[in-house]
Image: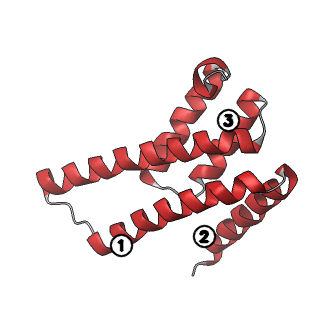
Amino acid sequence: RDCLLSRGLGDVYKRQILGASVYGGFFTAAQGVLYVALLALGTGRTIKDVNPVKNWLSLLVNVAAAGVYLIAHVVTGAEIHWIGALVVGIGSLIGGYFGAHIAKRLPDRVLRGVIVVVAIAALIRQFVGG
């Protein structure tokens, strides 16, 4: 198998992935949905094929963002809510692990439907509050 990001993705999509990564490092809401859409459209591969790459991209971007926030804390004294960061980090690792295993077993059509439902629910929650 060829590398999804190096051979299958055009320059325009690579720039869009970079933009999604910058967005994801600051505000992670729907980061995975953006990655899945860009990777699937950019390569023509199935959601199942791009999901592992999405998980790795999310992990790398969030670790990098955590490093930036940690440096800001050390250098400028920026406040970090450590308990919240720990809960989000652990939840993301658990969700990524189990989500990947569940996604492998679901038919593509069902997986796509789950992604759409979760994305719409998250969007509504952002606008309504909660």
The answer to whether 47 appears left or right of 4 in the picture is right
Name the residue carrying label 3. 39
Secondary structure found at label 2 = helix
Percent position (x, y) of residue 34?
64, 46
Distance, label 1 to label 2, CA atoms, is 19 Å
Mark 3 vs mark 2: give the one in front: 3
Q: Are marks 1 and 2 in contact (CB under 8 Å)?
A: no
> Residue at 60% of width from left, 51% of height from top?
32
Mark 1 vs mark 2: give the one in front: 1
Secondary structure found at label 3 = helix
Secondary structure found at label 1 = helix
Name the residue carrying label 1. 84
Q: Earlier in the sequence, mark 3 or mark 1?
A: 3
> Residue at 55% of width from left, 41% of height from top?
20
Q: Are marks 3 and 2 in contact (CB under 8 Å)?
A: no
Percent position (x, y) of residue 25?
43, 48
Type of the residue with mark 2:
Gln
In what quadrant of the picture does the C terminus appear? bottom right
**Is the residue marked by circle 2 packed among few (<14), some (14-19), or many (20+) residues within 10 Å?**
few
Residues 16 and 94: in front is 94
Percent position (x, y) of residue 13?
64, 28
- Quarter holding residue 118: bottom right
Distance, label 3 to label 1, CA atoms, is 30 Å
Q: Are marks 3 and 1 in contact (CB under 8 Å)?
A: no
The answer to whether 98 appears left or right of 43 in the picture is left
In the image, residue 42 sits, relative to residue 117, either above or below, namely above
Name the residue carrying label 2. 126
Type of the residue with mark 3:
Leu
Q: Earlier in the sequence, mark 1 or mark 2?
A: 1
